[in-house]
Amino acid sequence: MAESLTQRVKELEEELERLKSQLEKGVEAGEDASSPSLNESTSSRKKSSKKAKKERPFDFSAHPRRHVALRLAYLGWAYQGFAVQENTDNTVEARLFEALLKTRLIQERQSSNYHRCGRTDKGVSAFSQVITIDLRSTQFCGGLGVTLPENVELSTKNKGPVPELPYAKMLNRVLPLDIRILDWAPVAEGFSARFDCQSRTYRYYFPRGSLDLELMTEAAKKYEGTHDFRNLCKMDVGNGVLQFERTILSATVKPVQPQLDSSMNKYDLFVFEIKGLAFLYHQVRCMMAVLLLIGQKLEAPDIINQLLDVQTNPRKPQYSMAVDYPLVLYNCHFEGVSWQQEAEEVNHVLSTLQQHWTQSAVKTQVVHGMIQGLETMGGESSSYCLLVEGSRQKNYRPLLERPCCESLESRISHFVKRGRLELEESENGGEMIHRGKRSKHSSTSLSLPVSSEMKQSGNPKAED
């Protein structure tokens, strides 16, 4: 037994010497194929080298930056709203910044000089949302909105015009299919999507059903003009919105397909289109809710005049808003902006939307066919409007007979006590309101006088 073990040890030693000899010869000849372990080691080094190259930081300081406007469309039904939120990352803006970072168009949000035209709520879509932002550029020769890297002179790389980066194409290839960049435009460095917007247009789609469209059309006109809309919005006092006068340029109710104007089919679609300089939080959905009450003949068109009369009715009656999914931010109008469109990319976006439409239209017809089948069996359709949040009331209670929400003054007092707003006395003895607590050295806080009608307080550019 001992002899066999000794013999086995000798054999292993000889094998080890033979392998060492082969390894030394391979190293001298620059070969590594003779040793599997050496192959693995070399392969590992190559992979780590590639990984190191991938992790090399992108040098944004070597590229010009350009202040641009991006126009985008999105279907908001699957998102918790447009703007980024602390409690969820399922927002359009979160997906947008993921794409901007992935394409290396920005280094970080904080330094991107970002503004949005408006912030749409959960479930609300947009066809012409606009943002302004600083993006990486190819324009070393300068141009509108271009900022050159430090220590780079304008003439250093001025060798003729160079095409700008295809912003829409780059972003659309990494964005979800329900968020699409339509086009972009170079703008001046101080241009803001929020503060330079001339007007915004919203559309709210709804079926005819049993609604009285003539009454709704008459009532919609009463929204036009400059009014205090505190009874037709959600008062966002905690965020410093203290002024509720807004100007509505037009408000109409019309069929989606004009040729169906004379039709009485309850499944025909109509649209409430409203154009204004700016909108308050939930304003359009509150306005639509009141129109639906009028269309059901539960309220008279004059209820709008009464709600706009904040002297007589300073507190908002409690009522439910219209639901979110039919609402679309359809247009944001700017003056002097030259949108850069690429035919190929427009066709790409159109094709994507046609896919969405095909699926939705077919599903709609499937459901409609089932409804028609039940109606032929003697089923009776409900006349109740399905576009208002909350449960249906058996006995309708007129708006002006309902309990009211807190007054504006009460809300201000509440947020002052909580520290969200700050009251100070002005030099002339009048009371001043500041949004949030501010330091003694701060000069940027919002300070506005308080009057009995609160006409001069708050932020006139508050986002919808």
Image: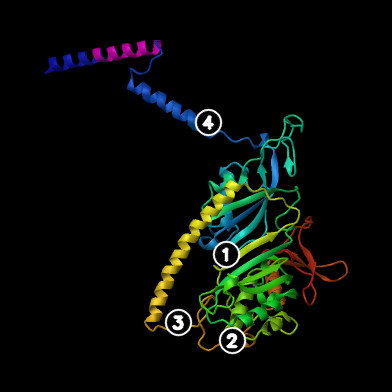
Q: Residues within 10 Å of mark 1 (few under 14, many from 20)?
A: many
| Residue bounds of the magenta highlight | 14-28
User: Disc 2 vs disc 4: which is toward the camera?
Assistant: 2
Dominant secondary structure of the residues highlighted in magenta in the image = helix
Amino acid type for the residue under numbered disc 1 = Val
Residue 298 has which mark? 2
Q: Residues within 10 Å of mark 4 (few under 14, many from 20)?
A: few
Amino acid type for the residue under numbered disc 2 = Leu
Disc 1: which residue: 124
**Residue at point 28%, 12% (across, down):** 18
Disc 4: which residue: 53
The N terminus: image quadrant: top left
Query: Is 151 situated left or right of 94 in this image?
Result: right
Whether residue 318 appears in this view of the structure is no
Q: Earlier in the sequence, mark 3 or mark 2?
A: 2
Q: What is the x, y in percent for residue 464? A: 66, 65
Front one among 435 and 90: 90
